[in-house]
Amino acid sequence: MVEKIPNRIRPRANELVITANFIEVNPGKIADKEEQQISLDEYQTVLSKGTVVRDIEEGDVICLNPARFAKYQEQKSRVKAAVEGYEKVLTGYEFPIITTGYGNVMLIHDSDVKYIVEHGFVTYDPEPDVEKECVNYEEERCNTFSTDVATPGNMEKDSPKNN
C-alpha cells in the first residue's frame, strides 16, 4: 500500500511549524552502539506560523520547552508505601513529529517555546587551551594598544596646569 505524505502543512491560529533536527548525544562513541543515542535538538528553526502568533517570525531560532512534551506514569511511591501514595515518574518525551515532502517537521503551539534566540550562537569551550589563549591575548594586546603609553612624565607635561 502506498502511504500518502503531505507535501507541506500550514499551521492554524497559535501553532508553529518548526524543523525537527536531531543531534547525537554521545558523539565520540561510534563503536559502542548501545551508548550512542540520537536526541531532538532543543534549538529549532521556525518554518511557518499561524495567524495569531505574535513575537515569533519565520526563520527565528527558538528553544523548545521540553517539559511541555514530557510523559509521566504514576507508580507507587516507595517512600509513601505506608500511606499508599503514588508519584509521577518521567517515562519519556513525545514530540509531535510529522513527515512531509520537505522532511520531518514539528507542529507545536506558541506556548511550547521557551525563548527566541537572537544574534546567533557563540562557541564555549569548557576546557580552553591556556597556551593558545595566552598567545592570542598577547597578539590582541599588541594590536590594540598604541605605542604612546601614558607615563607620569607624559601626564605632567600634557596636564592643563602646565599650559
Image: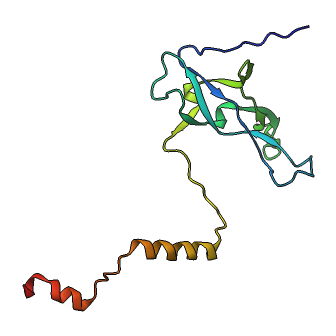
Residue, x 57% and y 22% (percent of image)? Answer: 48
Which residue lies at the image location 78% right of the left edge and 47% below the top edge?
A: 25
Whether residue 36 sits left or right of residue 55 in the image: it is right
Toward which corner of the image does residue 10 lie, by quadrant? top right
Residue 147 horizontal/vertical position (percent): 35, 81
User: Whole-percent x and y of residue 26?
Assistant: 81, 51
Residue 71 horizontal/vertical position (percent): 74, 31
Residue 112, compared with residue 77, is above or below; it is: above
Name the image quarter holding residue 112. top right
Whether 133 is drawn above or below 57: the answer is below
Quadrant assignment for the N terminus: top right
Q: Residue at x 58, y 72 (%)?
A: 133
Q: Is residue 153 left or right of residue 11?
A: left
Work out whether 123 lies above or below 108: below
Q: Is residue 63 left or right of residue 159?
A: right
Q: Work out whether residue 134 or residue 110 is closer to the camera in this orientation and state it.
A: 134
Where the C terminus falls, by quadrant? bottom left
